[in-house]
Amino acid sequence: MSVEALDAHLQSGITALCRCWRVTRKDGVSLGFTDHDLDVTFDDVVFRAGTGLTASALSQTTGLSVDNTEAIGALTDAAISEEDIFAGRFDGADVEAWLVQWDAPENRALQFRGTFGEIIRSNGAFTAELRGLAEQMNTPRGRVFQRNCPAVLGDARCRFDLSAPGFSAEVSVTSSDGRRFAFDDATQFDARWFERGKLSVLSGAAAGLSGAIKLDRLNGSVRLVELWDNLRIEVAGGDMVRLTVGCDKRFATCRTKFNNALNFGGFPDIPSEDWQMSHPTRMSSRNGGSLR
């Protein structure tokens, strides 16, 4: 990649420029778009012409202000479909915008890097808010002191290995309406074992989608799992899914269910809020009730 060669090309007065956009979804699928009339290829990605993706002027400033712009495109089955947007496949997708010399794609400059924000669909088209890297400055930082563990099960703070035997299962769906699932071959786990965990679809039309598990019950020889939200794409009988164990963030659960007490990130013995208003009293119990 040569920015210097692109600068020299711009100074020549006669240019062969186009804009290229690379969109990388959370499931790893990468799509390329260009406003040129022919396909452009670099970094092993084909930026396809005629996909109808355009963008308003990029607003880039110094300092920590958030640089927001938007992309506008047509909904097509070959590129970005309404079904994929509705299913959430493009939520939080990474976006790169390049200025490219189309007859020498190695001469290019990265103009924008960020993520998709809010996506609006209307009349066969979509408008996607583009959020710059400074958007991450809006994320709360620091340690929260609370009774329950703030870590996400399996992350760097938790350190629990979710690939250990008995903490996930790949099973075939017996029946589903997109939110409630029934399984005939996952009854070896205790009831509520996967509650607060995750269901990930491995095959079928909804492959790549996932949802948080709200309820996990056993009904005889059938396991019933309910998600907090509908997956929005049909999951048919016979499709494979992965069920991942859940955690309710309590110290007792961390110790007995996962044998991971040393990495517990909460403070189970932290005083309750009653102590902020403590005063001399004969009452020894402080349970959040009235102080008399």
Image: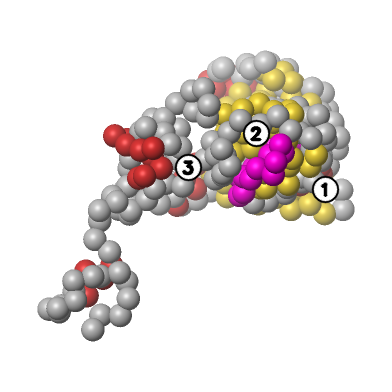
Specify the label residue 234 is tagged with.
none
Q: Secondary structure at mark 3?
A: loop
What residue is shown with label 3?
Answer: 247
What residue is shown with label 2?
Answer: 187
- Give 249 or 135, whichever is nearer the viewer: 249
The image shows residue 16 at horizontal and vertical percentages of: 72, 25
| 260 drawn magenta | no
Seen at 32% across and 36% down, the residue is 261
Q: Is residue 88 visible?
A: no
Seen at 32% across and 76% down, the residue is 289
279 w.r.t. 82: above or below: below
Q: Real-space Cα distance between discs 2 and 1?
A: 45 Å
Q: Secondary structure at mark 2?
A: loop
| Segment colored magenta | 206-224
What residue is shown with label 1?
Answer: 125
Which of the two discs, 2 and 3, sits closer to the camera? Answer: 2
Seen at 79% across and 22% down, the residue is 39
Display coloring: secondary structure
The image shows residue 179 at horizontal and vertical percentages of: 73, 47
Please, what is the three-letter code of the amino acid marked with disc 2?
Thr
